[in-house]
Amino acid sequence: MRHFLTTLDWSREELQGLLDSAAELRREPVNHRLAGKAVALLFLNPSLRTRSSFEIGAFQLGAHAVVLEPGKAAWGIEFEPGVVMDGDAEEHITEVAGVLSRYCDAIGLRAFPLFKDWSVDRQDRVIKALAEHASVPVINMETIVHPCQELALMRTLQDHLGQPDGRKFVLTWTWHPRPLNTAVANSALLIASKFGMDITLLIPEPAYLLDEQFMDAGQRQAETAGGSLRVTSDIEEAYTGAEFVYAKSWGALPFYGRPDEESSLRASFRHFMVDGAKMALTNGARFSHCLPLRRNIKASDEVMDADYCVALDEAENRLHVQKALMLKLMDEA
Amino acid sequence: MRHFLTTLDWSREELQGLLDSAAELRREPVNHRLAGKAVALLFLNPSLRTRSSFEIGAFQLGAHAVVLEPGKAAWGIEFEPGVVMDGDAEEHITEVAGVLSRYCDAIGLRAFPLFKDWSVDRQDRVIKALAEHASVPVINMETIVHPCQELALMRTLQDHLGQPDGRKFVLTWTWHPRPLNTAVANSALLIASKFGMDITLLIPEPAYLLDEQFMDAGQRQAETAGGSLRVTSDIEEAYTGAEFVYAKSWGALPFYGRPDEESSLRASFRHFMVDGAKMALTNGARFSHCLPLRRNIKASDEVMDADYCVALDEAENRLHVQKALMLKLMDEA
Amino acid sequence: MRHFLTTLDWSREELQGLLDSAAELRREPVNHRLAGKAVALLFLNPSLRTRSSFEIGAFQLGAHAVVLEPGKAAWGIEFEPGVVMDGDAEEHITEVAGVLSRYCDAIGLRAFPLFKDWSVDRQDRVIKALAEHASVPVINMETIVHPCQELALMRTLQDHLGQPDGRKFVLTWTWHPRPLNTAVANSALLIASKFGMDITLLIPEPAYLLDEQFMDAGQRQAETAGGSLRVTSDIEEAYTGAEFVYAKSWGALPFYGRPDEESSLRASFRHFMVDGAKMALTNGARFSHCLPLRRNIKASDEVMDADYCVALDEAENRLHVQKALMLKLMDEA
């Protein structure tokens, strides 16, 4: 049995196998290979793409997805071990994992960090607790990484650029009214480095560096795969020659849990928005974003409506890669 | 590709085709003509019948319905073009429409008006924005019209009265504690006029006239089809000789966005409730309502429990007409 | 047509038939005996197990479950007859039952008591109103009893103990931060007495006696089936020789609707938590709980993680017994 918690646990070859399977499923979307099987999708946070694509994907394979929202329509869950549970949570992850493992053939979880203490959140304890207690595969639907998004991004990259090795990938921070999760940024770094790309991380200042566990992994994977990773605050330099521009906003980790201070820092960086002028500096780059995206905040209407914007392709690929993943994890045959 | 935004875009013959198909599906409810297909149902407002009937209807045709609630379990959506999205919405309808068009074979939307500015709401911009950006058929699940309800009403009318032309149809306003959407009233007017009925619109005073775009369309369609449309405030006159009584409450448009003033106006009209005495004036009329209905507010227990009440038949027909609609819009074969 | 509102309406033989069918479905979980059929699941309260197990169970039989949450994503419902509906509810159970009976082949309802007036809540009016107006079978998904849980408990008991007659069953009250529903306690009493067990009800003081309608039924059924029912406050005496320990917390009925007073009474009874020392007094008893369970409040980690804890088995059996129930109620063939 295998979990899908982070691509760090999966080799490039294994991930490519999923991407190849996704391309096949895109050509032939409906089969019955998971007939009678079920997957539980636990959402602690909102979702449109993830929910739709997993639910429809399961259906197209003959399976059924149950969507559960603990703390809303389902009971609140405690994730820490050994606790005297006299707070809000009515149920421990041990039992949730145990019960759903009896009903289902896989469990997906979306659990965003709590934005209070990064030294806790960076450990990704919630999904690790689920995986520890589940006896069926656990799929990360976004915690502090978003590995399903990584697969969709890499499928899209390969669809548009072919072989990713040595291609110039820019991951640019953008402004947003709130300090967002670093998950997709961490993930973009992980997957681009795993596949040997030449990565430029564009951030307005050092406070926007990603957590060192991901910076280090990106560096290490880039070296292994023959790619590279550099960090810059120079917008023009970053965009020049780029072949793929990927945008994401996130909060500065040194100010984690202090949103007002972070907001002041962030306020002067609205000009990091991706616009037509910046894209004109690239080497005919494609642009993408994981969505949801605030238009004219993270990227201009011009960029979003341009032919080089492949965000919808990436969103569509969520469906295909997740079906490949469910087949890999849930199909014993 | 065809949308189903309003019956104004569909001819009487086309609508009758859907009604005939609905009758067939009522006899043989289960098939696999939409096997492997998916429809997304976006609810910005509550639903019982619409959700159940679309979800079960899709299932009975071999398809799958995904229910999404933007702003609650899914991200909030911005519907206006060109906006700098620094408000609450995390996502623009352009991307929502684009993504769901990649996952699904049709998209349903329920988006009630906002009750602030009728000059805006009357344009029905939200569903038009969705239809503009979707590359799959869009189905109106109630905005400022409710065309699926129109089909169910006309299916029920024909089941009970046969040929609708020239039959006496009374659309009566009723009191309700809150100023409700005019959608179902607009729609009753549209479908009854399209099918050549003799329509009496019973309202307590001129402030309760429907928007002129619907009054005009009703007049125009009545003329075309050989029916008629008159307005009265005389309860006895309206009910006398009626063959079908349809009740709905709605807020007075001149007071739109000023609920306290509208409430004062409305307060003296509680006697418009449909009751046994009023129904006794009719020519053995059937009574119906779109539901949900507050008993002893819009209609008395006596009326709701009478044999002539066909509201459950109409509700049931939602299932059949929507299946006919999905087959028409989603079945390429 | 048959409802499943309480096991009091079903004979031991009929219930054993469901349990036997459940065991078969556990061995062969997937079939198409309910192909094309639908069940509506109305949740007025949260759920994880009930929702998942009904939804997946329906799927594994070829049917579809629609999950509705009145008052949240669906309209609020009025359950009292004859009311002038000028309060919050937009719809009466008469219409909800009528409409869902047109769309579905069965309706499940979860409606916890309101904790205001036990003389009202003890009548279980809400589900009775639904059953009265529905023309399809109604399934109790927990009101003031939880008969689906009863089936799961008895399936688990038989799996682990074999023939239940004369086996020593301890139903122990435990502390909890809030005064909970008595439903599962009532149900444990009903099913254990129906199957002739020797029942000990362990409560900290007489205020925690269950409602007399259930105490009486337990006594009556125990006599009929050759079992027994006694009440004690002596922890050591209760556990000694037990073969099955079942824990549940509930609020003291004499203090119903006065949570602060009840809380003071309850405060001194935290030591009723099930722990290893208590379990060591038993005759190698199995332990179970309906879940959700607060660890180290109702039962210690030691108990929950022990081999003798069969709570996950009981949770799993929810799936199997409910499938047996749906087949019994929905399968005309």
Image: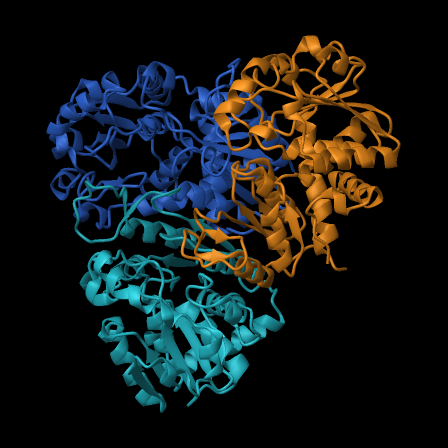
Chain colours: A blue, B cyan, C orange
Task: Tell me the residue at 43%/26% (across/down).
Answer: A7
Residue B44, image x, y percentages: 35, 52
| Residue B146, percent from left and from top | 37, 67
Question: In which quarter of the view is residue B135 placed?
Answer: bottom left
**How many discs mark residues in the rendered view?**
0
Name the image quarter holding the N terminus of chain B: bottom left
Q: Looking at the image, which is closer to me, C129 or B65?
A: C129
Residue A58 shows in this picture? yes
The structure residue drawn at horizontal position 66% and vertical position 27%, both measured from the top left corner, is C312
Q: Nearer the viewer, residue A251 or B280?
A: B280
**Could you say where residue A186 lies in the image, as x and y percent from the top left?**
33, 25
Q: Is residue B145 visible?
A: no
Please say if B261 is above or below A224: below
Residue at left offset 49%, top offset 47%: C69
Q: Quadrant of residue B10?
A: bottom left
Q: Is residue A3 left or right of residue C313?
A: left
Question: What x and y, as percent, mark residue B37?
Answer: 50, 57
Rendered position, A101 above or below C277: below
